[in-house]
Every structure is written in C-alpha cells, then in structure tokens.
Amino acid sequence: MAATIQVENLEIVGRRGKGAELPIVRDVSFSVQRGEMLALIGESGSGKTTVALSLLGHIRKGCRIAGGKIRVAGYDVTALTPHECRSIRGRIISYVAQNAGSAFNPALSIMRQVVEPALVHRILPRRDLEARAVSLFRALALPDPETIGERYPGELSGGQLQRLMAAMALMTDPEVVVFDEPTTALDVTTQIEVLAAFKAVFAERGITGVYVTHDLSVVAQIADHAVVLKDGAIKESGTVSKILFQPEDPYSQALLTAAEPRSRQADLARQPEQPSLLDVRNLVVGYGQPTSAGLPEKVIVNHVNFSVPKGSMLGVIGESGCGKSTLARAISGLQPWAAGELLLNGTPLAADVRERTPEQRRHLQLVAQNADSVLNPSKPIGQALERVVRFYGGLRGGAATRRVNELLDMVRLSPTLASRLPSELSGGQKQRINFARALAADPQIVLCDEITAALDTVVAAAILDLMKELQRDLGLAFIFITHDLHALQSICDRVAVLYAGQAVEVGPAVALGQGVHHPYTRLLHDSVPLMEPGWLEATQTRRLAEATPAPISPLSLDPGLCCFLARCPDRVSGLCDRVPPPVRSVPEGPRVLCHLPAFDRPEFST
Amino acid sequence: MNRHLVLLIGRRFLAAATSLVFVVVTVFAITNVLPGDATDALLGQGATPQAVAAMRHNLGLDRSVFVRFWFWLWGILHAEFGNSLLNGLSVADAIGPRLHNSLLLAGASAAVSVPVSLFLGVTSAIWKDTVYDRVVSILTLGMVSVPEFVIATIAVYVFAVRLHLLPALADVGSVHSLRQFLSAFFMPVASLALVTLAQMVRMTRAAMADTLSAPYIEMALLKGVGPIRLILVHAIPNAIGPIVNAVALSLSSLLGGVVVIEVVFTYPGISGLMVDAVSSRDVPTVQACALVFCVTYLFLTTFADIVTILSLPRGRKT
C-alpha cells in the first residue's frame, strides 16, 4: 500500500525583494505511512516550515515550487488548482500553527473558528459540529469544554489555545495533520500537558502526521520517524531511535550534543566564600496605585530576596508571566520598585537608573533578550562599541579602536567585523556583540534576560560556553534569567525559582533534581522532557498514580498564603490553605518557601 | 457592556467636551484680535469719530471683552448666535439654509468617495504589489499632491469652457430633476471626492495589508477558507477600526475642501457666507461659522475614536 504522504525530490525557490531566486528547499524526499508520525527536525532557516506548508499546497509569497512531487492521501498536491487545494485544506490535511496566540483571529469567538474548517467544507450542520467540538475539547483535557468556545482568544492562555488549535485541526477527521512547532512557545509545565493531550488523541484516532520541531526531546516523545533538515536539504532520515541514539551525519551529531544537558561547571572545587556583590532584599515591584498596605495594586515581583556573590552566576527561572523580566528591569533601574532595596557592593542603589552614579551604572550592565532591538541598525558595530568605550572609559582614537578589538576578541569575534552593520551578522554574532557592548563598560555584574531564547540550540550552547569563559577569565558575576532549566543547570552556581512573583526557592544549582525542594521546583524539573522514548507516558502514569491533591477550602484567596497552592500536588488541607508558608532552609540545600518541602524521587535525578 | 469599555468611551467624550470648551474660547479670542471691526466696514473710511463711537455703542462693541464673551456664550447655550452686524438679521437664520447646502455637497462627496475608496483600498491590499496596486497607488499619490482648486479649475476649463457640457457655476436654486442635479453637482462633488478619495484609499490599503499579513489570515487559508469569506469574515473585522478612523479623518478634511470648492463654483454654502462675513468684519457670523466647522470636525474625530474602541476584540464581547 502506498504511503499516505509521499514527497519526492521537492525543490522550492524563493527571492527576497528583487534579488535572484535562491533555493530554499533542495531535493527533499520522504514518506509517511498511515498512522505514523514523522518529525521534521531543523533549526531556523532550515526550510522545515516551508516543507510543512507545501504539504497543504501553500507556498508563502515570493516562493514557488520549482520541482518535485507531493502526494497526500491520494491527491497530487503539486498539480492541484487553487480551488482544489482549498477543498483539501482543512478537510484531508489540516495544520496546527506554531503560535496559537497569533494564529487565532482575535475578533472571532473560539467556537466560530474551531467549527469553520468543517463548516466551509459543508461536512455537517453547525449544531452537530459544535457538539463534536465540545467532545474534542473534552478529549484534549480543556477546562469548561461546554463553554470555552464562547470565549475569545485574548481571554485564554497559550497552552489552552494550542490545544484548541489541535481541536480545530481534528474537527474534520482529516487523514493528515501537520504540526508546526506547536509547543515551542509554551512553558515546560504546560508543554508536557499539551504533548500528553496530543498523544492521547493521535493514538485514539490513528492520525498520520508531520511534526515540525527543533526540540529533540519532544521528537523522542511524539514521533516514529525523523528527518533532519539543514539549509533546505535532508541530512539524515530514519527511525527516531536511530537519529537520537546512532546519528551518522555530523550535523545530527552536533544537534544532539548541543541538546544534551551537560555541565559546563569547570571544577567543582569549592572556592572560598566570596563577599556579596549584589543583594536583592524584599524587593516588591508592581503596577497601579498603591493600596492601603502600601503595596501596588498589581504586584508582579513579591518580596524577593537573594544575593549574588562576586564572580558567581545566579540563574533565575520561572514560567512566562512569573515576573522574571520585571525583576530584571527593576534591578537595572528601568522599572521603579515599590518596596525593598537593592545593594551593590553594600551600597543602596537608586530605583531610577538616572539617579545612579556613573560608576554604579558601569558596574551593573544589562544584556537584552533581542539583540536586534538593542543594536542601532544603521551603525557599524565597531562604532556602536566605540561609543560605549568612550562613554565609560574615556578612550579615544587608537586606544578606543584597540579596546574595541579587544572586546571583539573577548566574545570570540574577528576584529574585521567592526565595519559591518548589525543586519550583516547572524543571530549568534549579534548576541555576541550585544555581550561585547555590556563588557565595554567593564562591569562587575551582567544581567542576561533570556539571551538564548531566540537562538538555535547549537548557537545558544556556544553563547553559554562564552558566558562561562567570561566568568572564569574576568571574574564576572551574572544573573541569568531563563525558562530553560538545562541551560541554567549547565552554567549557574545558584538558582532562584520564581513563581507568581515570589522566589519560592533559592539554592545551589547542583542540588536541583536531588534532595529536598519546593513542589513547584520539582514539577518544573520533571516536566523538562528527557531524550528517551516513553518518558512522556512514564511521567504521566507516575503523576496519575500520585494521590490527587488534597481538597482545599474555597476561602483560600488570602494573598499571604502559598502562591502555588492551587496547583500544588503536595498541599495539606488545614495547613497550606490557612497558614502562610514559612521560609525553610535545607542544610547544604536550598532555602524554600513551603511548609513541607518535598523530596525528589530517586528516578527524577539526572 | 463591560465597565472598562464604558470608561474608555466616557474618557473620550470628556476629551471631546474639553476640546469643545477650548474651541469656543479660541474662536472668540481669534475673532476679537482681528484688526478693525464692523464699524469700519459699515461706515467706510470717511466716518467721523463720533459716528463710529455711537455705532460701536449701539452694537455693544464698547463693552469689555469678558462681558461680550459672556453674552456670546450665553447665546450659544440657547442656540442663539446673535444678529449680523451688517443687516441685523439673525445669524442662525442666515446659516440654516447655507449649512444645509454645504452638508448636501459634503454628503454627496462622501457618498461617492467612501465606497469607491474602500473598494480601491481593499482590492489593492488584496492584490498587493500587482500592476493594479501600482496603478491605484500612483494615481492616488498624484491626487493627494494636487490641491482641490487646481482640480476644480481644470474641471471648469475642460467641461464648462471648452466642452460646454456643464455650467461653470453650481446653480443649486433650480434643481428639479436628476439631470439638473447632476449638472449642478457633478463638478463640485467630483473635485471634492477625488481629493479625499486619495487619502482614504491609501489608509485603507495600509490597514488592510497589515491585517492580511497576520498569522491568523494564513491560518484561515490553511483551513480551506475561500477568498471572499477570508476577506469578509477574517480580515475586515480586524481592519475596520483603522479604516473607519481613516474615513472619519478624511471626511473632516473634506470640510476644508468644501470652503475652496464653494468659492470656485460660487456655491451658496456656509463657507461663502463665512468668506463674505470675514471681508465685512461681521464678527457674529464669522464666529458662528467657525464654530460650526470646528464642531463638525470634533464630531467626526470623536466618532472615529469611538468606533476604534468598539472594534477592539476585547470590546466585542458585551
């Protein structure tokens, strides 16, 4: 029997502006049997999304199919007229977009959009479709399946929207579903739920699918076969276990190495206790008018305490919306705080960066997440760096040029790049320049806000290596804000876990995954997918086997109570919903904001 | 209605009211710093100082600025704009029919330009970067840069002077048939519509193109949604806010165009009245006309903002 999806020698070309046509996809061939899931693995610019979209006969503006054949469920997609293409889209083959937040139309209710594919293909009357949608919502474990469809995309969370998008794709019982990085924009604790919901539905309906991703541990959970793409060409293809455990192509091997959690800790020989460089004490940041208690109306960062010793690296981790970025903005003096204090070398810092002394500003530098938004696009990078050198170091002429070359060398870039514009550099190079700009001030501590989030795995790994080198060679201290637990564990000495604005745990990074922790830290830690098939099922089974959380009294809305109460699997009724949690210190371990810090189970430790 | 929305709209009305107060004060202040007054115009150059003083007393021009402002404001609040300094007739009565004529002209222009420009704007956004889009773009760019009096004058030269197809003056008094209506209104309406059209087409195209490049449009395509449904159901509801805004702003610029067009075609509208009143220093009439223009402008911009607020997705849910 013929494969459900068959792609043969696919060639797609595209042009940018008025330039010549360049190949985007070269000679790509693969096939997917009925009921199987194929992973398209690649980094940004590898052409994986272009290939995925071409399965639906959709080619983005400025591109065209230059050769090859695509067959999906018996249709020759490359030979279809636009009208025929429309008739198979959403009916025979459907699509789940990367960012459900922007792929849902903000002006239409969820239900209208979910039933639309089935409606435009006149599969069933609207009433029956709505009933089918509700049963899909239930199958995908969405809250309030009966009424969630009446809501608008702006009112739902990213994880819910992603599952609703899968429901939309399944409405017509399509033969093939294309998933384009459906969990990349989600937090790990949400990702595991969405993956589990997807997988249950796939198994039940025997769906044939293509799953586009760059995350190899997700591939291990979801796919049967995999194709590794680079620069539009296939590097390697085969079963998932072959790609993940016996990769032959050097590029696949490099991808695997970068994705593997590995420690960059140079030597674990205990250094003598360093004096504290930066102290955050009871910091409260928020928005809105102050209330009677003197706190802001909406508290984003809630009484956070930690300190960063000289030359050490503190990781701040938490899910989106937990207040990490607000904390970074407050520390760098861009967002005033409502209460608490910040000490640099024992001296209090002003809340407003304009009121800090030049010396204080020099010592504390921020590296922003998106290098593109920081670097002036019309200034050569050498000039941009020279400006900082002149401003902080007072260097001019030859001395300034020498210093700029030195900085470029520090971030492992060639001095010949100094005359280039930011647009002529790659994402990783730009992030290095972003680093060099901070180093130009000769700081003592560098604040890094999600600096690896927008980078590909291989490039991000190199940036982490660079940070570790700078820490070792220059004795720099770092605050590394991230949502990536692996990255954090690989370079940081200490970790602060943020949940709903509170630092629920502060402790040594090596202790993560062993010993006693806050229940949220545990949840975070065992939600990070491991690169082994079956991990997802094992984790789900284990979570189900655990006792259901104790019921809590509905009156537990006191802001003084534990912020994790609603989601906590280990809560104790009568205690957690009545008494605010104490700060407990575990010997040789973290400081935890919890009544009953939980032991990590042995099988969780890495 | 949700509270947030009511608050937003209430705030917008408050802003409009504040601007209105500001407008009233400014109109009065500006008409009072103009050099000379109605006595100069009425009595001419050779008037004796006594005659001037007596007339100023009769007209109430010798009282202090604040007293006059108070009387004026009191009048406005009672829809009473005072009497013309020239012929003693009620300003409100003089403005009435003229305003009607002007609104007719502006309304007819809007009725032509709004549908045409929405069509051109939306279609050129859909067929972005095609020959059609380029042609529309070049033509509208050309239109934007030509002042309305040039278009009007060329139209008069071609249609009235050369071709003798239409009268050079808009004779509104003798409109009894469609043919007469067209002959009186064709040129003024066409000139006005052309100028406002350009701006609306460009802004509609920008708003629509922006919406069409959104990920949810690509998603709708991938669901198998057809082109008509794509535009009507998915794109228009999201582009409607900026489009209505563009339309309302263009219509308010139509008011400025009305002044010029009415003069070129000697059309009996409110701007003709205002121009005459300025040259004869008939302050009450000038004030009333200025106020009418400002209030119309304010109304259109407030309307545009409220539509924008209501078209926001979170405002859709009641």
Image (spheres, coloured by chain):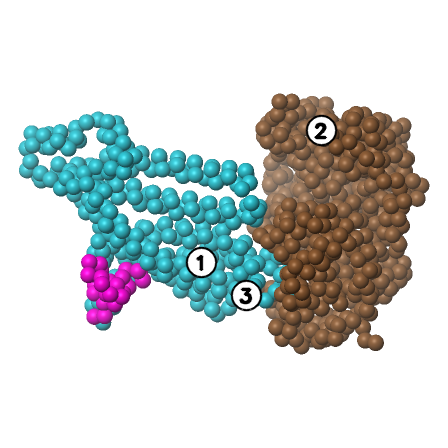
Q: Quadrant of the N terminus of chain B?
A: top right
- Kindly indicate whether the residue at mark 1 contacts the one at mark 3 (C-beta within 8 angstroms): no
Magenta-colored span: B164-191
Q: CA distance from mark 3 to mark 2?
A: 51 Å
Quarter occupied by residue B28: top left
Give the residue pinned by disc 2.
A559
Instruction: Decide: is B305 above or below A355.
Output: below
Residue B46 appears in the rendering: yes
Q: Secondary structure at mark 2?
A: loop
Q: Residues within 10 Å of mark 2 (few under 14, many from 20)?
A: few
Give the secondary structure at mark 3: helix
Spot the cyan chain and give its letter: B
Q: Is residue A282 left or right of residue A196?
A: left
Q: Secondary structure at mark 1?
A: helix
- Magenta-drawn stretch contains B178: yes
Labels 2 and 1 positioned on one and the same chain: no
Measuring 24% from the left and 27% from the top, which residue is drawn there? B67
Tell me the residue that label 1 is attached to: B202
Say which label, 3 or 1, has the lower sequence index: 1
Quadrant in which the C terminus of chain B is drawn: top right
